[in-house]
Structure formats: structure tokens, C-alpha cells
Amino acid sequence: MAEPVTVSDNKHKSQVNSGASYSGNGRSSAAAAERSSGGSGSSSGAGAAGGGLSGGLTQPAGWQSLLSFTILFLAWLAGFSSRLFAVIRFESIIHEFDPWFNYRSTHYLSSNGFYEFLNWFDERAWYPLGRIVGGTVYPGLMVTAGLIHYVLNLLHITVHIRDVCVFLAPVFSGLTSISTFLLTRELWNQGAGLLAACFIAIVPGYISRSVAGSFDNEGIAIFALQFTFYLWVKSVKSGSVFWAIGCCLSYFYMVSAWGGYVFIINLIPLHVFVLLLMQRFSRRVYIAYSTFFIIGLVLSMQVPFVGFQPIRTSEHMAAAGVFVLLQVYAFLQYLKDRLTRQEFQTLFFLGVSLAAGVVFLSVIYLTYTGYIAPWSGRFYSLWDTAYAKIHIPIIASVSEHQPTTWVSFFFDLHILVCTFPAGLWFCIKNINDERVFVALYAISAVYFAGVMVRLMLTLTPVVCMLSAVAFSCVFEHYLGDDMKRQSPPAEDSSDEDDRKNAGNLYDKAGKVRKHVSEQEKAEEGLGPNVKSIVTMLMLMLLMMFAVHCTWVTSNAYSSPSVVLASYNHDGSRNILDDFREAYYWLRQNTEEHARVMSWWDYGYQIAGMANRTTLVDNNTWNNSHIALVGKAMSSNETAAYDIMRSLDVDYVLIIFGGVIGYSGDDINKFLWMVRIAEGEHPRDIRESDYFTPQGEFRVDKAGSPTLLNCLMYKMSYYRFGEMQLDFRTPPGFDRTRNAEIGNKDIKLKHLEEAFTSEHWLVRIYKVKKQENRDRVEHKLRSSNANKQKYTSKKTSKRKRGYIRNKLSLKKGKKLQKKFL
Amino acid sequence: MTLLSEKVTQMMEWTSKRSVIRMNGDKFRRFVKAPPRNYSVVIMFTALQPQRQCGVCRQADEEFQVLANSWRYSSAFTNKVFFASVDFDEGSDVFQMLNMNSAPTFLHFPSKGKPRRSDTYELQVRGFAAEQLARWVADRTDVQIRVIRPPNYAGPLLLGFLLAVIGGLAYLRRNNLEFLFNKNCWAFSALCFVLIMTSGQMWNHIRGPPYAHKNPSTGQVSYIHGSSQAQFVAETHIVLLFNAAVTMGIVLLCEAATSDIDIGKRKIMCVAGMVLVMLFFSWLLSIFRAKYHGYPYSFLIN
């Protein structure tokens, strides 16, 4: 079923891409217009080239906007449809972990209303602490999805809220590509914008976070990010309060959607600061930044989760500092008109350095006295790259917080990672105010992406934009030959017509002398053969990019990870639906307020799918609570039972992949539980105890006895020793770790197995209640005094008979009284 | 009883002089081995003499000094725990007595009873960072030591020096500051930074992989790590060069079309750019394919 879809997707993509590259000549007209207008870099799209001619398809402007519109539409369509692999292969389902929480809260929002949602105290999470959801989430995502659901229902299009959530990210990817188009158009020209829009529609670095079902903040936040940047560039270029206010509103949306807004609030001040250093200060910058800072600050503080952070944490101080600096600078500029040159110079240096010093010192002072919170761990680990590894295991444990290898750069960006430095080169060579911005954006984002895999997401848009600049530069010169047209690389014929038409029409409109001369020169230089070869090769690269993107999306990023699939040798597919099976079992067979203990990864899923109370979840705000769970998992059963009883645990849920060879199970995560537990309870848990003396982590006979007797091990391998999976392997052979387990005879005392899913992926244990009477473990003490060997009492003297096991009557009280 | 208090006073006196007491055989027997003792002693057995050529000992000694100093000058300082060291060249008899043949070794002598297995610090597993040592000491003796490192002035000093040099140079060349406005210079450094990051140097910095791997049995050196989860330093350098080559190819293609130099050169530039892009990109793709198993696509080079 998936096959035909893949094919059609491919086709879509390659069409869109080639369409974009065809538009090269359409673009060159815009570029020409730009050049003729003195290179101010402000070709405002199709209109500029048209030169205010009245519309209709006979005019180039009309063709251009039709073409841009078509390409953007196709980009949206391609982006949307390539994100649907998971839905088509499986079903319309929410993916992974965090999206389950988002879905649950969106569901709450849509059924209870916005104010209820803001006041929502979730007693099902972090038992016994609970969680104030309204004050601890970025509500943008839920509000967006809820709003769409509400509007659709108003129009009597009755969709389930789940479907809105599933398809939200793919829809927003189209908006992202449009805002990328707008931003790139501001930075370079329209053709580059179209290329960038196509790139970002299908680039895996962004798809990884926005496939259908991945209902997460990032899905909408990248749109907000790009749109905010577009409006910022627009307001710097125009210096109008209108655009600056628009920028603030978009920023507000971003703040309400994702914690990554900190990137914006540091990047924009950095831009202003660098502009000041480059002596590119202007009224436009002053107006834009002053408006943005004040309104943006006030708006961002309206989000309950953010609250007073913008004025109280170090992450936001750079913005305030630059604001003060900008005011001082502007004031000095004002004084410049009133003073002599000599006076001014002294005053200028004195004033600027004094202001900088005062700002810096006051920030340090306030941090020191505690008015401003220092950098939080997650941000700090971005600068001091060894910090998290030593101090915060819970940050270091998350796989997406690892540094990035070159393979993942290439995997996520393919050709773009090689070409975007070229785009950066062109931008810096032809610098202006907004290109300073994109250069800073690229440099800072590439640093962050290098430190954390997860931040590849913020790098992706700028890579798309700069690569589009590079490609557009090449195409501009190698496709721009209009007089002698090379035979176009074979593709769809209608596209070709478009192209020719656009090109011819452009010839009529393009009456700029300079451009014509340039064209001649180019023609005399590089013959049509060379040009066509270059063009073909570039198109080839783009085609490979499109194919790569589809392959990556289909193979790497389209697994819901709630439902697993395995393929047989003949290509047929097995669906492993163990997670939902187990969660549904919990939902149906346990008491409504039962408390389920699991490792934090599964907290959101349990709450979302099983609707049961959890102890810890993916929010990870309370390290000591997580450490307690980790301690319970890594202690022996008796010690764990004490912890579990103190936490009122009814069920324990673990993930075990040994039967099917699933590598993401709890035994593989186990060392992190130990580490996190050790961080809080160094006396009871020691990481070294779980290793063999040679420092290995093994589950077989050679493994450390502490490991073989800890709760997690026992629960994972309970009765596993009786199971022979294969005739070639001994019973109790763990497929994930390729080892025969070391402890096959596992007895559980305080727990009993309640449920094990079909492929043993999820195992649920019930924590027994305490016995009414403590059973005595050991045998009753027997003293030798009473014990005597049986000797026949039939002696010669006593010849009486003897009945063995004769009941002996004891005289007691009457019992009737008790019953009365 | 008097003997005990005398010993404690003696130990306190030494500690006030040097936070790590240096011991020889006699002192060791008297103050650590001999019975009346109500204090724990953490001893580092080491070989610091230059002729022993023990580089690790020196580093371990520094960390141990940091730990001992943190304890000595902390407000919680008591006479329950002492830090001492025995050098091989001063107390080789102690080494023999304890049947010890490697240095450095950290041993804890508890106030009661004999040292057990866990009183030997697992140097191989835990490393000799002062923080790890402090955790071990806390574990063994119930004394929490907050490690306070003497602030490292080297970094800021170096930075200040560098800034001063740059400032000085700028001042000397104050009439000739065009290089600051040279776009090529800035663009080049930005490109360098970007290429360094995209080739995974940050990963190398954090994880510290080997430069290349030499197969011990065949002696073959492999520069490319077989898995997509890891990389060698050599590999990242190769990737950096390839990325740079593709970038340069694109720039050359553009330059060939726009610059004013004569046609022949421009044609050469154009072809060179094309070759650079194609060759190095397909090469990069083939390396990627070798690392990412199951990746189906390749171009020119398999």
C-alpha cells in the first residue's frame, strides 16, 4: 500500500524542485531589477520586475506571480504529502512521547475550554505531587490545535481533535515554507526564495520533527521562528513601527509555542549589536529594535509559563543590555549635531564604554545578589560542553542532547550542508543590514547544532535559505542565457512552456542596458555547452537531494514508535502493537486511580493512553522524584518494595525487548537510571556495582550480582529463562543483548506478574499489598528438646496398644460466648 | 589514652603545616598501622621522583592536593580524617609490607578495623578527579568534602594577553585598519567556523575519539569509523576538506560567470568548479554510504 504513495511522492518532489530551478530565469529578471535599482537588495517580489504594469497574463509580473504561487503551492503539497508516510502505513495516530501529553492537554482544552485549561491541576502526573499544567506548558500548540478544531466545528466539519493534532505539523510545514520564501526574498531575491521554500518543504532535518502525528511544539515553532525573522528583517529594512509590531506579535506566538524563543531574543539583539559595531546604525534599526524590545518583552510576559523570566533570567539580559546601549548610542548621535567634533569624540567613547560597563556590572551584581537567575543547566551546557556530563545526568541521558556527528549533518541536510557555506560567502561578500542578520543566524545556529543533535532543527531553515542563495547564484548565471537557449533537461513539457514564456516575456520587460551588456559578456565567455552541462549537473544534484529526502523520511522519520513494524524475508510486514495492547489493558483492568510506576520515558504515554496516574513523566522537572524511581528500579526487591510502598505504587510497567530484539528497552536504559539514582542517593546506589570487575555491563552469568538481583533485572527476565525462542539458542537467550541471561530462576516476593504483552515488549507487575501477618521466611526454630526419636513404647512391661496420630482432646473454654 | 591523644596532636600539627602529610616507613607504622587510633587516614601511594617517570602520579598528586586542601581549609575540618602520602623512594618498605606494586594507589585506613576491599580506590574505573575522590572519601568516612579548586587564572590571563596583543597590533597599525573592513577576511573566517562545525569537530571535542584506528592483527589503519554513530578525528578532517571543496566549487562556478578576467581562465574556472562539486560530493556520498548501512544511493563513485 505504501509503494504507490512513495512513487507519487517522489514525482511530486522532483517536479517541485525542478520547477523551482526552472524559475531561474523568472528570478533573474527580479535580480536584474534589483541590480538596476542600485543593489539596495529590496526587490519587493514580483511587483518590482513588473514595474507597475497592469495585470493580466500578458504581463511578466502576472506570469511571475502565477509561477511563484504555483511553486509555493506545490511545495506545500509536496511537504504535506511526504509527511504522511506514517499515517498511510499505520494509521492516524499520535507519535512518540511528548506528543501524547500535548494531545492529552489539547483534548482537555477542547473539552473544557481555555480558562479551565489554564487552571488545570493534573493530579494524574507526578504522584503524589501533581502538576500545574496551565502554568508549566507553552500553550501555543494546544491553543492552535484547539482553535482549528473549534473553527472546523463551527463550519460543521466535524473532525475529531486527534485528527487535527495529527495533521497540524504537516499543515504548518507549508506555512513554514511560505515564510521561508518571504524571508529569503527579503535577503536575496525571489528565485532564491522559491528554492528555499522547496528545500525546507522536504528537508529531513525539519521533517524529523513535523511528520504527521508528531504533535510537538517544534512543528509550529519553526514557522513562528521564520515568520518572526521575516518580520524583523522587514522592519529593519523599512524602519516602520507597523512591521515591528507585527514582529512582536509573531514573537509572542513563538514564545507561547516553544522554549526555543530564547534563540530569537538573543539573536535579534546580537544583530543590532553587530550593526552598531559595523557602524550601520540607522533610525530604522533604532525604531525597529526599540519597538520590538518593549512590546515583545511585555507580550512575552503574558505567557503564564514564561511569567517574569524575561526580566529575571540571564538568558534575556543580553536583549536588555543592547536596548540600553542602543538608547545611549542614539542619544550620542543626537548630541553629535550639537557638539564640535573633538568634544564629541571624547564624549562618544566615554559614553559608550561607560554605558557598556554599567550594564555589564549591574547584570553581574544582580546575578550575584540573586535578582537574576543564572543560566539554567540546559543553556549552560551549550557553552560549557562538558558541564551536563558531569553535573546533570538527566540532561546528558537524553539522546537528542548529544553532540552531532558529521553523518547526522549529512543525513539531515544532504547536499545543502556542502553548499550553504557558499551561500554564506555570497551573503558576506555582498553585505547589507539584513544579510548581517542571516550570517549571524547561520553562525550561531551551526554552533548550537554542533553541540546538540536536537538543535539541528534551528539550523535547518538557515541552511535552506543560504543553500538556496548559492544555487540561485549558479542558476542565475547559467540559466540566464535567453538568446540562445540550450535544450532544456527533459522534464515535464508544460513546465518547459512556462519557462520559455517567462523567459521571453522577461526579454521584453528587461530593458535594462547594463543587464544586456552583462549577458553578452557572459555569452562570449562560457559557451552554451558548458552552461547546459553545469545546469544539468546542478539539476542532478537537486534531484538526488529530493530522492534522498524521500528515502530518509520514509525510512528514518516515519515510525510512530508507539506501533512497531518488522519485515519478514519476503517483505511482508508484522505490526507489533504491544504498547497499545498493554496500555489498553491498564485502562480496562485496573482501578481508576491506580498508580503506575515506570521509567519517565513512558509517563506521558501511560497518562495519555491508559489514563492512569504516573509517578514521573517526560516533563522531568523534579530530579529527585525521578531519582527515587530510578533507585527503586535499581535496588533489590525488598528495598524497592519499601520505596514503592512509600510512593503508593500499585503497578510497575517496564519495557523489555529481549524477545523481539528491540533495542530501546529498559535494560539498555538501565545505566541511566542507576546514574540518576546515584546522583541523589550516592550511599545506596553505586554505578560501579552494576559492572563486572572488568568494567563491563553484562546480563549473563558473568554480570555483577547486584545487577542480577535488582528489581529491573528481575522484572525484565521473570520467567524468561523458561522460554526458548529458537532451537539454535539456549532457553533464556536475550536477543537484544545477544546473551543467555545469568539469572534464570527468578522468584518475585512482593510483586506478581499481572500482564505481559504478546511479544513481551511491555510487562506489567502488580505490587502486592502487605500481608496481614508477616510470613516467616525461615523455618521455624526447632529445638532438640522436644524432638526425640520415635521409640516403640511397647516394652515388655507395657503391653498396651498405641494408636499413631491419634487425635488428642484438649479441654478448652466454651466458644459460644464469642458468637453471642 | 595519652598515646592516642599524642598521636592526634602530632597529626594535627603536621596537617597544619602541609595538608598532605608525607610519611615514611616509620611514621606509617607508628601512626597508621599501630593500634590506638580513632582517625581515618587516606593515603596516596605514589612515586613522584623524577627518575620514576610517573606522569600519572603527578596529575593524581595535584588532584589529591586539591582534595586535601579543600578539607584542610573547610569549616568542617576535624581531626577525624587525615590525608597522607607515601612515596616509593621514601617508604619502599611500606609498599612491600602492603604487597603493592603499582602507583598511584589510594587506600583508606578506617579508624576501626582493617581496610577492606572497598577501601582501595578503584582508580581504573573512577579516575583520579578530586570530585570522584571526594565521593569515595565521603562514602568511606562519612565526611563530606566540597572540592574547591583554586581558581584557574590561566584562561582569563591568556585571554587578556591575547586581547592586549590584538589591541596593540590594532593600535600600531591604526592608520591601516582596512583589514577589518575586508569582506574576504570576514567571509573566510565565517566559512571556516561553519565548516568546522558541520564536520563534527564539536563531537570530537566532547567525546575525544582516537585519530584513526589501527587494526592490531593486520596492522591496517582505518580512517573511517564503521558505524554512523561515531567518527574518528581523521574522518572529520576528510569531511571538512570535502565540504570545503564543494563550497569552493560553487563559488568558482559563480565567479566564472561574473568576473571580468579573460575568457580562457573563466572557462577553466568553470570546469574546475564543476569538477570540484561533482567529484567531492560523490566522494562524500560514497563515504556516507559506507558508514550508513543500507543507504541505497550513490553518484559517480560507488
Image (cartoon, rainbow, N blue to C red):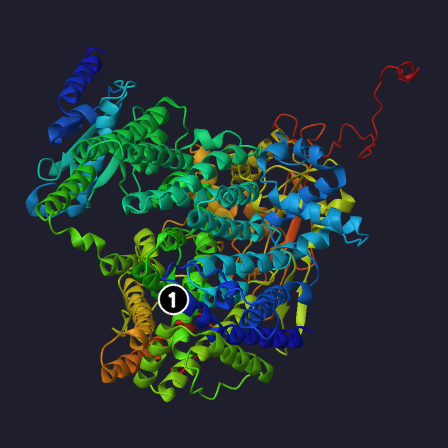
Q: Nearer the viewer, residue B83 or A312?
A: A312
Q: In this rendering, would A452 be left or right of A338?
A: right
Q: Residue at x 22, y 15 (%)?
A: B4
Disc 1 crowd, CA 10 A, few/some/many (<14, 14-19, 20+): some
Residue A484 image point, x, y percent: 42, 87
Q: Nearer the viewer, residue A653 or A623?
A: A623
- Residue at 21 percent of width and 30 percent of height: A347
Query: In which quadrant of the rendered image does the N terminus of chain A lie?
Result: bottom right
Image-quadrant location for residue A87: bottom right
The extreme left residue here reads B51
| Residue beneath disc 1 | A36
Picture coordinates of residue A480, whole percent (x, y): 42, 78
User: From this viewpoint, is residue A791 visible?
Assistant: no
Instruction: Please say if B201 is above or below A617.
Output: below
The answer to whether residue A716 is left or right of residue B149 is right
Quadrant of the drawing holding the C terminus of chain A: top right
- Secondary element at image label 1: helix
Q: Let me know if residue A692 appears in the view.
A: yes
Give left or right: position of A808 versus A369. Answer: right
Chain bearing mark 1: A
Does A350 appear above or below B232?
above
Q: Nearer the viewer, residue B33 or A509?
A: A509
Please state which amino acid type lies under the numbered disc 1: Ser
User: How many numbered tags mark residues here?
Assistant: 1
Give percent across and percent down for residue A324: 36, 32
Measured as percent of width and height from the top left, residue A499 is found at 53, 79
> Residue at image x 59%, y 65%?
A79
B296, above or below A589, in the image: below
In this view, the residue farthest toward the top is: B2
